[in-house]
Image: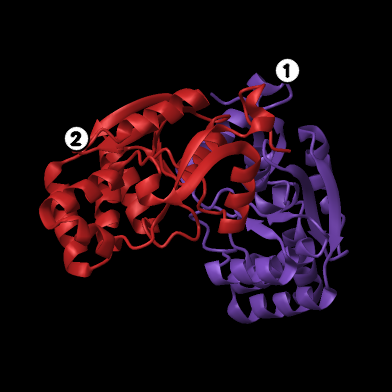
Chain colours: A red, B purple
Amino acid sequence: MELGLLYSGGKDSTLAALLLEDFYDVTLVTASFGITDAWEHARATAERTGFAFETVELDAEVADDAVETMVADGYPRNGIQRVHLHALEAVAELGFDAVADGTRRDDRVPSVSRAQAQSLEDRHGVDYIVPLAGFGRGAVDALVEETLDVRTGPSDQIPKADYEDELRALLAREHGEAAVAEVFPDHTQTYVEGFARADAESGAPDAK
Amino acid sequence: MELGLLYSGGKDSTLAALLLEDFYDVTLVTASFGITDAWEHARATAERTGFAFETVELDAEVADDAVETMVADGYPRNGIQRVHLHALEAVAELGFDAVADGTRRDDRVPSVSRAQAQSLEDRHGVDYIVPLAGFGRGAVDALVEETLDVRTGPSDQIPKADYEDELRALLAREHGEAAVAEVFPDHTQTYVEGFARADAESGAPDAK
């Protein structure tokens, strides 16, 4: 079964891919508005972890709406949520048997309700899978520690591979750098460099 | 990391074990009130699928309370929920690093809220993991079809391996067979016989 996983290059979506790889042919799909080349960072992580990779184009109007929402709100939550749902729709239209993302149990945003999940599945004839929906922060941190080599830091010092980088760039262009700092204060990001050292030889995770 | 998975011998908890086995040392744990020997069916499935197995004893008073609740309600939901939470507590006390169960996204019962999950984790110093929380019915059915050999049928014709069999036995003893039919009408159950034929040779699932 072919599965397209909405992919950011971060620890959560990389771990989600590892959880699914025994059961699906996983393709990492990074969504892009075409505003920056951030998706290239995701491609690099996909290459280092051995997963198939592709990009999907998002609708520029959704980026404009999301940025205006974030500026009006003063925080990114609703804008990110809007873009995430749009990106899931885009991946669902690519013809995979199943669509997935890296959302965790404790994420406040993005968050896809059970009704939204069912609607996505029914309209596109796919299964929508959230492999980390039943994993809390402690479990995710423990699994990431054992399986992945991760760089963690403030958003402006970590390669950002998905639409969030593009939303920040658009925000800066339309409203200035100060607006970025106001909307995204102290935002920590992760970027996966590859597998943890113990796994490097086999090239595959075995976290037991 | 050692993980104890609350195990019924059914398709959901068996699939949950397969999803976790690359990341944890999984022990299947079947909870029993000591009312019937139903847990022996779970042990048989554990042997056929190659997982470690143990049982954990539940408090008889919880069974009594659950049965009285089910009779008063006329349906099993609240009684099952009470017993499931009690069983999770019992597994959490066994000293594993992580505790899991086979609950799916679309299950109405048992259902553990995010607050209950956090409380279980904090009080016992464990991670609580629900590997199928992000899988809907369609995805679970597809994965089970590809990985497991399953018998499906009415509850009274399928070997039942967990506390539900015991609750039915206790219900029959205290309130008569008619009460069982009234509380559990047309209840369908599954029992895992082993891996699907395609996987039988390797003894391990590879559902790609």
Residue displayed at 34% across by 44% down: A121
Cα separation between marks 2 and 1: 48 Å
Residue A152 in the image, given as x and y percentages of width and height: 49, 47
Q: Chain of mark 2?
A: A
Q: Is A79 displayed left or right of A145 in the figure?
A: left
Residue A3 in the image, given as x and y percentages of width and height: 42, 31
Viewer-proximal residue, B54 or A157?
Answer: A157
How many other residues sit within 10 Å of disc 2, few (<14), some (14-19) or many (≥20)?
Answer: some
Q: Are marks 2 and 1 on the same chain?
A: no
Quadrant position of residue B167: bottom right
Q: Is B3 displayed left or right of A98 in the figure?
A: right
Residue extending farthest to the top is B201
Q: Amino acid at mark 2?
A: Gly
Q: Which mark is residue A69?
A: none
Residue displayed at 55% across by 35% down: A18
Viewer-proximal residue, B149 or A76?
Answer: A76
Tell me whether the residue at label 2 lies in contact with that at label 1, contact meaning CB atoms closer than 8 angstroms: no
The residue that mark 2 highlights is A34
Q: How many marks?
A: 2
Find numbered disc 1 in the image and state the secondary structure of the residue it sits on: loop
The residue that mark 1 highlights is B201
Find numbered disc 2 in the image and state the secondary structure of the residue it sits on: loop
Residue A149 in the image, given as x and y percentages of width and height: 57, 37
Quadrant position of residue A73: bottom left
Residue B13 in the image, given as x and y percentages of width and height: 66, 47
Q: Amino acid at mark 1?
A: Glu
Q: Is B35 displayed left or right of A78 in the figure?
A: right
Residue displayed at 27% across by 60% down: A181
Quadrant position of residue B124: bottom right
Viewer-proximal residue, B158 or B78?
Answer: B78
